[in-house]
Image (tube, helix red, strand yellow):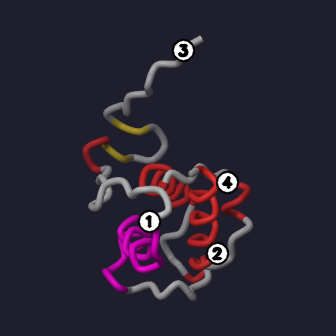
Amino acid sequence: MRCKRARLPENIHGFGLLHHQIKPYRNGLHKKGNMNIADFLRNFEELLELAPETLTGTETLDELETWDSLAIIGFLAMADDRYGARLTGGRISACESVQDLFELVQSAAVAAA
């Protein structure tokens, strides 16, 4: 049985977002294995709507005010779209810092290659 590709509704139920408010990531897809911490931090800052060069990687996730369930969904999409890393919520919930998230995505991207 084939599944049809889901189309975003005009108003994403439960999130109050319109589909045109969801921004694409600025640098497009990365080649697998081409991942560095600086690039990851810039993309993560964009996801969390933080000023550029705010994050260093040493921050705990609890310190980040905008790290919430919606950000986790966006992170799952970013990891898959940008780095080819397919993650689960359970693996993300085991992370305590931004560095942990980077290492998780990096290892998942290498495994997918």
Quarter residue 54 falls in: bottom left
Among numbered discs 4 and 3, the one appearing first in the sequence:
3
Looking at the picture, how far across and down is residue 56, in whole percent? 47, 88
Magenta-highlighted residues: 34-53
Amino acid found under the numbered disc labelled 4: Gly
Among numbered discs 4 and 2, the one appearing first in the sequence:
4
Give the distance between the C-alpha atoms of the residues marked 4 and 2, in whole angstroms.
14 Å
Q: Residue 2 carries which label?
A: 3
Looking at the picture, how far across and down is residue 10, in whole percent? 31, 33
Residues marked 3 and 2 touching at CB (< 8 Å):
no
Task: Identify residue for label 2.
Answer: 100
Between residue 44 and residue 32, name the one nearer to us.
32
Among numbered discs 3 and 2, the one appearing first in the sequence:
3
Give the distance between the C-alpha atoms of the residues marked 4 and 3, in whole angstroms.
25 Å
Q: Is mark 1 on a helix, strand or loop?
A: loop
Q: Is mark 4 on a helix, strand or loop?
A: helix
Among numbered discs 2 and 1, the one appearing first in the sequence:
1
Quarter residue 106 falls in: bottom right
Q: Which mark is residue 34?
A: 1
Q: Nearer the viewer, mark 4 or mark 1?
A: 1
Residues marked 4 and 3 touching at CB (< 8 Å):
no
Amino acid found under the numbered disc labelled 1: Asn
Give the distance between the C-alpha atoms of the residues marked 1 and 3, in whole angstroms.
32 Å
Structural crowding at the residue carrying mark 1, measured as other residues with C-alpha within 10 Å and reported as few (<14), some (14–19) or many (≥20)? few
Q: Which residue is drawn at 73% across and 56% down?
A: 90
